[in-house]
Amino acid sequence: MMAVSANSTPTTAGDHGDSRIEGLLLLAVASQSLGLAASTFTAAGLWLFVAGFALLMLALPVFLNREMHNGGSLIPTAVVSVVLLSSVILAIAALVPTKTDAGPEFVSGSTTFPLPKDLAQAVEKRGTESALDDLQRMAAENTDISSQAHQIAHAIGEYSLNYYPTAGEALAHCRSDFQSGCIHGVVESYLTASSGQDSFVTFCAKGQLQGSDFLRFNCLHGLGHAALSMAKYKLQEALNQCDLLGVEWDRSSCYGGVFMENVVTLYEGNDFLTTYSAEDHLYPCTALPSQYLVQCYLMQSSVILILNKYDFAAAFTECDTAPAEFMMVCQQSLGREVSGFTLRSAPESLKLCGLARAEVRDGCIVGAAKNFVDYFGRITEGIAFCGAAPSSSKAACYFAIGEEVGVLSPDLSQRSKDCGQVEASYLDACLRGARVK
């Protein structure tokens, strides 16, 4: 038989059990502590906290049963108290937020659409181009920002007027990103402030702006936005203002801005400013003189979709009821909406265009392709979209890309080079659209 020293205490199986239970309790608290700390940086930390709490709940009854069996000695009771108190404190810390995320700050009162303070500071410190670069990154990371990027770019343009000596210079620092929202913002804000008819006629005149027809188009389109605002949203008065411009191309570009501004007010819930009819979804196109109808129907799909709660199948059917000479224009308008609705996803855009009748489907695909180019101000995404289109629609799609090439570049050799990026079988279609052939 083994001898036991008088100065030692025999170790029993119960003592080993007590140690294991106390170890489990300490491990539970440690897990909760680590989980709380980790949850500051990653959602996985919350699961670690929950695991620690579950471990505590499993071990605690066993621990209390041992306490009762041992007669409730002082030291174990103190351990239990510390464990319970620590758990309560950790639970409160984990479940009650110590701070709230206030979200992005906005510059108030300076622009018609809220402008994030970071972008306003980018304009002030680094210029409009840097603010648009920042917006590109934000839109790529956040679908909410992406869906509102045109309006935010519009606000950047408005805000930039405070930081350049002339409106022309502010315009020169804009780009065509986000459907040229920055350009529209500069033009509309400047003309609304000046309210001068001479300024309206000369601001975008040929020779006044350095750059491509695409820049002139967007300047003239911005004039249309401003015209409706200056006319206090009386549609015909704004169109009459566009009629003061010299040539048909200038007037037509301006009409498009008027009709887009009319749609924007409806989209933003300001229907009291909008010329529309809840009963006739093709109105006001059904009541306007013929010179305005192409541009009217090019925007009317936006009205249709707002009023029918974005039922695309029904919208295609409604466009089928437009006068024959404007039916394909209405379908093309829906293609633009399809591109925006899907946030320029080629597969999703083609899927929605597939809801149109086969006889008019090319109209939708052409509208989507043009919007891919207009949104980014380059042809890369539009070419990729046409590459994914059905073979039966590719000729029309690449012809539309060519039309955009013709607006983006005044140089014939550059147009030929740009069209060289399309599928070889459809090079001729692109060159004809670009007016090279």
Image (cartoon, helix red, strand yellow):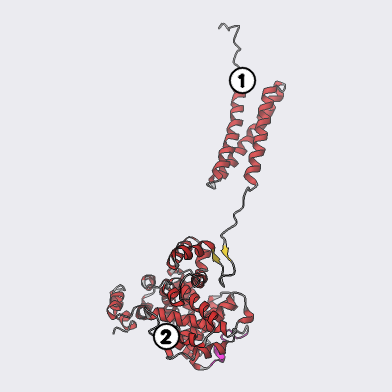
Furthest-front residue in this view: 165
Q: Position of residue 188 (x, y in %)?
A: 51, 78
Q: Which residue is mark 1?
A: 15
Q: Residues within 10 Å of mark 2 (few under 14, many from 20)?
A: some
**Callout 1, which amino acid?**
Asp
Please report the bounds of the magenta region as a residue range. Answer: 279-288
159 lies above or below 245: above
Who's the residue at 58% across and 28% down the image?
Answer: 23
- Specify the quadrant of the image occupied by residue 217: bottom left
The mark found on residue 205 in the picture is 2
Q: Position of residue 321 (x, y in %)?
A: 53, 87
**Callout 2, which amino acid?**
Ala
Q: Position of residue 378 (x, y in %)?
A: 38, 72
Of labels 2 and 1, earlier in sequence is 1
Q: Quadrant of the C terminus?
A: bottom left
Closer to the eye: label 2 or 1: 2
